[in-house]
Image (cartoon, grey):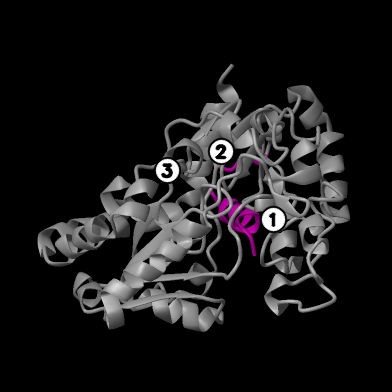
């Protein structure tokens, strides 16, 4: 299930739901494109089919490259057939035509919305799209994404539906003392691949290569020794979940683009995020919203997040380690961050009981759709 499904589920008995669509300020498009993607995609590297096809897939092939995972969407077609039919029905409706779609929101917290044929589609010009991150002019200048800032009338950054949150036991007590007793200071997992946007068989001109940022985490792991769980390589969800539940801090390092699913996994596991992404504040703040690639407002993550610049991360790991130890060794500071994270969890996790994610999405949509 994707964030789109969780969004609809949250609204079924929502006190502000209007059964008369003419009375609604926000109209939700119930097409489950994101959930379709979550249930069908197996392209772990999230690369265009061209970049995979150019690899030596018939000799000396690395099984982790997943060359069988050539994806039609978004590289060959904009939507799957079911989502396309659903969206056609919505856009042909009288309600949609009366508003030109300006008060409609389509939640798709999946990376496919920001690439390829989906990005270039004219379908979304008049609506608000709930997405993982906005594409501003800087991000749109690389990887053939110039259409990004104006793909939709409005954009709202919505939380990714964390796999960890799906299996989290929210009924189990989570205390600060439990957090302090976790055996590891830090945890991080990343794949053995290049973290850069590809254009066919080569990195796109001007695309930022995050591979060194991620590999640098191994140095922190060496410094922490057996007090860390930082490693390269995919593992089963159960092991990944155990690793981040055993850590006080979880690294959230930008990937091919400035955002990372790891932020929401960390929150689900009561693991304080350590953010390394200089452009996160520009394009990936949850519930930020805006037009033409400019996102404003959003939730303040600073009370429960440790942030380092990419330059600090690459060139001063002693400083990084010392800052983490300062928090661990000062229970008052650590408790404030832990308490702030507890307060934020219902706002960021779709599957948490009494989640308020849908309320924040609606609020941002309303603000954005009313803007000129």
> Closer to the camera: disc 2 or disc 3?
3
- What residue is rendered at 48% in x and 50% in y? 357
Q: Which residue is mark 1?
A: 34
Q: Position of residue 356 (x, y in %)?
A: 45, 51
Residues at marks 2 and 3, CA–CA distance in whole angstroms: 20 Å
Mark 1 closeness class: few <14, some 14–19, many ≥20 residues within 10 Å: many
Mark 1 / mark 3, whichever is N-terminal? 1
Q: Which residue is mark 2?
A: 156
- Res 220 → quadrant: bottom left
Residue 223 makes an appearance in the image = yes
Q: Residue farthest to the top?
A: 372
User: In the image, which residues are magenta?
Assistant: 1-19
Element under label 1?
helix
Residue 195 colored magenta?
no
Closer to the N terminus: mark 1 or mark 2?
1
- Image mark for residue 278: 3
Q: Kindly identify which numbered label has been placed on residue 285.
A: none
How far apart are the two marked residues, 1 and 2, measured between alpha carbons? 15 Å
């Amino acid at each position: 299930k994707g964030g789109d499904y969780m969004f609809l589920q949250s609204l079924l008995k929502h006190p502000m739901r209007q059964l008369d669509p003419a009375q609604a300020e926000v109209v939700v498009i119930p097409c489950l494109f994101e959930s379709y993607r979550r249930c069908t995609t197996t392209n772990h590297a999230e690369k265009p089919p061209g970049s995979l096809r150019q690899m030596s897939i018939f000799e000396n092939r690395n099984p982790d490259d997943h060359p069988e995972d050539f994806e039609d969407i978004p590289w060959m077609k904009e939507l799957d057939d079911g989502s396309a039919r659903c969206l056609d029905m919505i856009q042909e409706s009288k309600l949609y035509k009366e508003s030109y779609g300006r008060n409609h929101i389509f939640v798709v917290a999946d990376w496919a919305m920001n690439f390829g044929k989906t990005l270039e589609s004219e379908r979304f010009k008049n609506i608000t799209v709930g997405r993982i991150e906005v594409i501003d002019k800087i991000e749109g200048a690389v990887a053939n994404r110039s259409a990004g800032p104006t793909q939709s009338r409005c954009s709202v950054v919505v939380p990714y539906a964390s796999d960890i949150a799906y299996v989290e036991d929210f009924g189990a007590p989570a205390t600060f003392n439990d957090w302090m007793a976790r055996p590891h200071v830090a945890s991080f997992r990343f794949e053995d691949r290049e973290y850069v946007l590809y254009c066919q068989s080569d990195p796109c001109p001007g695309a930022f290569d995050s591979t060194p940022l991620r590999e640098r985490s191994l140095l922190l792991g060496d410094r922490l020794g057996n007090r860390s769980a930082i490693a390269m390589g995919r593992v089963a969800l159960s092991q990944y979940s155990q690793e981040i539940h055993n850590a006080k801090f979880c690294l959230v390092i930008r990937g091919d683009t400035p955002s990372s699913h790891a932020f929401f996994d960390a929150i689900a596991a009561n693991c304080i995020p350590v953010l390394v992404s200089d452009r996160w504040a520009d394009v990936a703040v949850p519930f930020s919203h805006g037009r033409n690639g400019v996102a404003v407002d959003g939730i303040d993550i600073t009370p429960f997040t440790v942030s380092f610049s990419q330059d600090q991360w690459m060139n001063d790991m002693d400083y990084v380690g010392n800052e983490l130890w300062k928090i661990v060794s000062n229970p008052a500071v650590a408790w404030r961050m832990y308490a702030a994270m507890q307060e934020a969890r219902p706002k960021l996790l779709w599957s948490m009981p009494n989640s308020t994610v849908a309320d924040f999405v609606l609020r941002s949509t309303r603000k954005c759709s009313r803007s000129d």
